[in-house]
Image: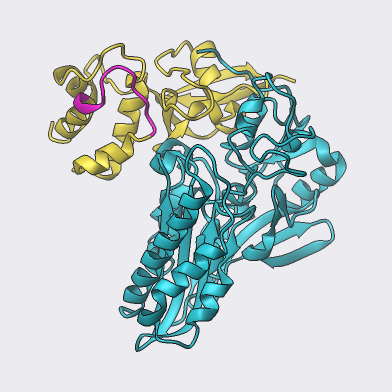
Amino acid sequence: MYLKHLPEFEYFAPKNVKEACSLLQEYKDEAEVLAGGTDLLVNMKHRRTVPKYLIGLKSVPDLNGITWSEADGLRMGTLATLQSIVDTPIIKEKFSILAAACSGIGPPHIRSLGTIGGNLCQDTKCLYYTRYHQGREAPCYQAGGDVCYAVEGAKRCAAMAIVDSAPALICLEATVSISGPTGERVSPVEDFFVSSGVVNLQEDEILTAVNIPNPPPHTGAAYLRQSLTGALGFAMASVAVVLTANNGVCEDIRISLLGVARTPIRARKAEELLKGKKIDNLIDEAAQAASSEAHPLGDIFGSARYKREMVKVLTKQAISQATERAKLV
Amino acid sequence: MKQLIELKVNGEIHEVVIEPRTTLLQVLREELGLTGTKPGCDTGDCGACNVLMDGKLAASCLVLAIETQGKDILTIEGLSRNGQLHPLQQAFIDHFAVQCGFCTPGMILSAKALLDRNPHPTEEEVREAISGNLCRCTGYTKIVEAILAAANY
């Protein structure tokens, strides 16, 4: 074992969001914001990113805290740790799949440091990118080079945004609040992910909160994640389902898949199959449709065909579970 | 640029002068001489560097020391009181849960985080609590036994 020293940097501790955005405006791509550090500091130790300036966000009051009201739903500051989300009773009660998703992220000593904002903004991953730093190969696209080792002959980066909190947030119709020098804006989480490693966030903007509206009555949800090594490994495929049903008929449904496309996606064909129909008769067909909307990469964790099959299996289970739970509220 | 910071570790206040890039793990071992906390992977994957910060488990290799001011940090050295071992430490001895001992400090702190919030865990809950602590020697069985036993000490 040897200690990997972090590269040198200058550190700022802004007192509010405005100050943090000004710092980003001033230092541009030489600065990074530091939330929990469980993604950024690892990248810095491996020299995959070497910012000259770190903007620590832990002491910005607006970014911390989780609040809920009957009128406005849930608001989580982006610096809320994943463990604090798991431990918040109202989240277990009304937004259970978010608690389930967060409880499956990383080992306990990471979950207590990592934040929801950091989870959404994390570096995209693929097995080859995390190993290229060993210096034996030319850099891949994501590392600034011109080759992809994950997909032979690929013309651009094929890494996926494996954001474990995303399927639950997308299905719960969550939005993110974003602050920048020009003001504030709100974006649905679904639109936050643009493509591999690209999120809808400007260089001088900061994610400040994640907001979730209260689900309507008769809404049930389920979240299933397939991974070879549990919480410690990448998700091979994850499925979240949130549906509203009356007497077994689907009034509304959202299905989100992770790990089977460049970004978290909605399985819209599967959703359309079920809307307005009796759910029990169509589960298999919907699961098949969701599977056809998945475009996974084959890797050592499973072939593309296996992952597509897992999407089918998990979607079927998730729709059944969500339907049962919808009957209870 | 080095900074003077004040850290509270195992109930004692320490002043150290360090660069912003110094991790809590480095400060504990190199500035304070508390070498019980171990560098395993230095990237948050092995659990050997686990400490408790304000009662919550944290990988000290991924914590900047300058961000720990005002926090209550507990390392393995802080578990025994007046020469008396903590029940977890005693249980690890009694149940032969230590071989080379490298994973042990991190393992015990993960167990303490569990028992502090859940005094009577099931075996599954114990295994989940130590899921981030890698051990190359024991095969985990005696460690799990020790933690379950410690709950009744």
Name the image quarter holding residue B152: top left
Seen in the picture, residue A59 relative to A131 is either above or below; the reply is below
Q: Is residue A54 visible?
A: no
Rendering coords of residue A184 (x, y %): 76, 64
Left or right for A37, reference A288: right
Rendering coords of residue B37 (x, y %): 42, 19
Q: How is the image coloured?
A: by chain
The residue located at (60%, 18%) in the rendering is A4
**Magenta stretch containing residue B137, yes or no?**
yes
Per the rendering, the colour in which chain A appears is: cyan
Left or right for B41, reference A94: right
Left or right for A294, reference A86: right
User: Which residue occupies the foreground of this view, A214 or A320?
Assistant: A320
Name the image quarter holding residue A176: bottom right
User: Which residue occupies the foreground of this view, A226 or A35?
Assistant: A226
Quadrant into which the N terminus of chain B falls: top right
Seen in the picture, residue B121 relative to A42 is either above or below; the reply is below
The furthest residue to the right: A26
The residue located at (46%, 73%) in the rendering is A286
Seen in the picture, residue A5 relative to A124 is either above or below; the reply is above
Please tell me whether the stretch drawn in magenta is mainly helix, strand or loop: loop
The residue located at (49%, 56%) in the rendering is A308
Specify the chain shown as yellow. B
Rendering coords of residue B88 (x, y %): 23, 26
Rendering coords of residue A210 (x, y %): 59, 61
Task: Specify the segment rendered in magenta.
Answer: B132-142
Seen in the picture, residue A314 relative to A14 is either above or below; the reply is below
**Magenta stretch containing residue A56, yes or no?**
no
Q: Is residue B127 visible?
A: yes
Name the image quarter holding residue A227: top left
